[in-house]
Image: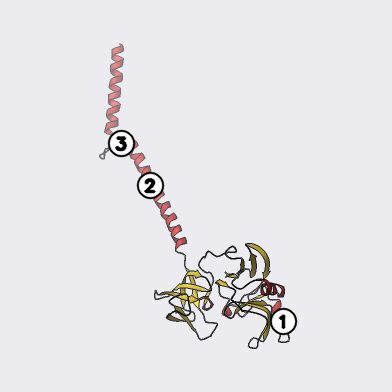
Amino acid sequence: MKKKVFISLTVAVVVISSVALNSINKNGENKITKYKKENTEKEKVVVANRSTKEFESVSKKVEKKYEGEALNVVEHNGKTKIYEKNDEGSQVISIINDYDKVELLETLPKGWFKVKLGDGQIGYADARYIRSEKVPPHNYNENSSEWVLKFNEENQKLRIYKGGKLVSESLGSSGLKDAFTPKGVFEIESGRRGYWAYIPRFEQGMKYWVGFKGTYLFHSIPFTEDQKIIEEEAKKLGKPSSHGCIRLPIDISKYIYDKVPDGALVIIE
């Protein structure tokens, strides 16, 4: 009796094994193996898609472009020179017209941009002639020099740092759109400061002016020719309203005039 039971069980196992073997498909895969393979392939596709999206996201960040447009508000002749080097004494490789677009490649010290023109040429442009919303990232910050003046156009605030510590903060006023204040990295220019100046063309005067790039200055709110505050203009502090310079309260402009030395770093963003 025991032998018959044993033989029956053995036959059952053989039958089941045979069925299992018969379930193998033409590719030598049984249903379980096929299921695992199909799901593994699906996982690979998901991972591949995720990796592609992550790569595209990183690529977009890396490939972010900064655009500027030429606008000569200094000589008002409609022309902007592009130089071989970031030096006005170097060769002029191209001359572009007002509102021509350029790609900003680098933000360089003393008010220069490395730029790419529409025809693919690479050169350098004086920041005074390039209007832009944003500038390429740079490594300059409040710790880059003993004295640093940082002006943010978005909130119209000037922050003054000494030894990396904030020593003064104030609202200011940058230039109007068609008389923009150049953005970039500059420095307080040697010997360019004065107690008083009057500009007949604008019918405005200013106290405690200090230059950071050519005719661009930090200075007080506007005054009349007989040195009275123009109240209407003084009320505009905190929003763009100047002819390109950065206007400040009298005490702040005096602080810069008295305390901030030549060569101090200026960052305008």
The residue labelled by disc 3 is 30
How far is mark 1 from mark 3, CA to CA?
A: 90 Å
**What type is the residue that disc 1 sits on?**
Ile
In the image: residue 165, left or right of residue 7: right
Residue located at (61% from left, 73% from top): 262
Instruction: State which quarter of the image contains the N terminus.
Output: top left
Residue located at (68% from left, 83% from top): 205
The circle drawn on residue 230 is 1
Residue 109 image position (x, y, % from top left): 52, 71
Relative depth, front residue between 264 and 8:
264
Q: Earlier along the polypeptide chain: callout 1 or callout 2? A: 2
Quadrant for residue 20, please give it. top left
Residue 258 image position (x, y, % from top left): 68, 73
Relative depth, front residue between 89 and 112:
89
**Is 184 situated above or below 25?**
below
Quadrant for residue 171, please give it. bottom right
Tell me how the rendering is colored: secondary structure
What kind of element bears circle 1? loop
Residue 49 visible here: yes
Q: Earlier along the polypeptide chain: callout 2 or callout 3? A: 3
The residue labelled by disc 2 is 44
Tell us which disc is closer to us: 1 or 2: 1
Residue located at (27% from left, 21% from top): 11
Residue 123 image position (x, y, % from top left): 43, 75
What kind of element bears circle 3? loop
Residue 245 visible here: no
Relative depth, front residue between 41 and 269:
269
